[in-house]
Amino acid sequence: QVQLVESGGGLVQPGESLRLSCAASGFTFSSSAMSWYRQFPGKERTLLARISADGSSTVIDDSVKGRFTVSRDNAKNTLSLQMNSLKPDDTAVYFCKVVVLGLPHFGQGTQVTVSS
């Protein structure tokens, strides 16, 4: 059973940083590309970042390029998203995602709120 559990969200002030984590189980993590999505209130989830199975290749959405970094630790089955210089516009729920046997799986999400 695929399980993805996000953590690390919270309330921060503009300009601060957060590191999100996604603990994965129930599939071969080291063989799976992983993604981060975010969802603004009233909107659909949108792709934010993607990382290859071995971590050698990443794609970051232009809206956060230079501020956000995606990484993974295949020994710990953990996906991470380092978010720096946060802005109020980054306020959203953040999800990790994996596709296993053609089916997408999302975690429950973690709320990030950026406000002074």
Image (cartoon, grey):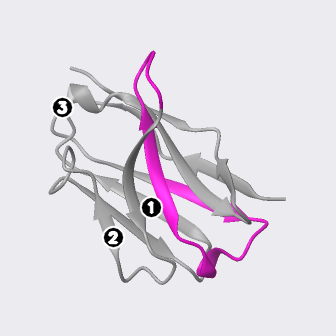
Image coordinates for residue 1, horizontal then vertical, percent: 85, 59
Residues in magenta? 21-44
Mark 3–mark 1 Cα distance, whole angstroms, equals: 20 Å
Q: CA distance from mark 3 to mark 2?
A: 25 Å
37 in the magenta segment: yes
Quadrant in the picture for residue 102 = bottom right
Residue 38 is drawn in which quadrant?
top left
Query: Where's the C terminus, which quadrant?
Result: top left
Cα–Cα gap, marks 2 and 1: 12 Å
Tell us which disc is closer to us: 2 or 1: 2
Q: Tag 2, which secondary structure? A: strand
Residue 15's x, y, as percent?
15, 38
Three-letter residue code for mark 1: Ser
Q: Of discs 3 and 2, which sits in the foreground?
A: 2
Q: Are marks 2 and 1 in contact (CB under 8 Å)?
A: no
Residue drawn at x 45%, y 61% is 80
Q: Measured along the vertical axis of the image, is residue 91 above or below residue 105? A: above
Residue 58: assigned label: 2
Q: Secondary structure at mark 3?
A: loop
Residue 92: horizontal and vertical position, in percent? 40, 29
Label 1, on which residue? 80
Q: Which residue is mark 3?
A: 14
Question: Which label sits in the foreground, 3 or 1?
Answer: 1
Q: Is residue 82 magenta?
A: no
In percent of the image, x 57 and y 38: which residue is there? 109
Q: Residue furthest top?
A: 42
Q: Secondary structure at mark 1?
A: strand
What's the amino acid at mark 2? Answer: Thr
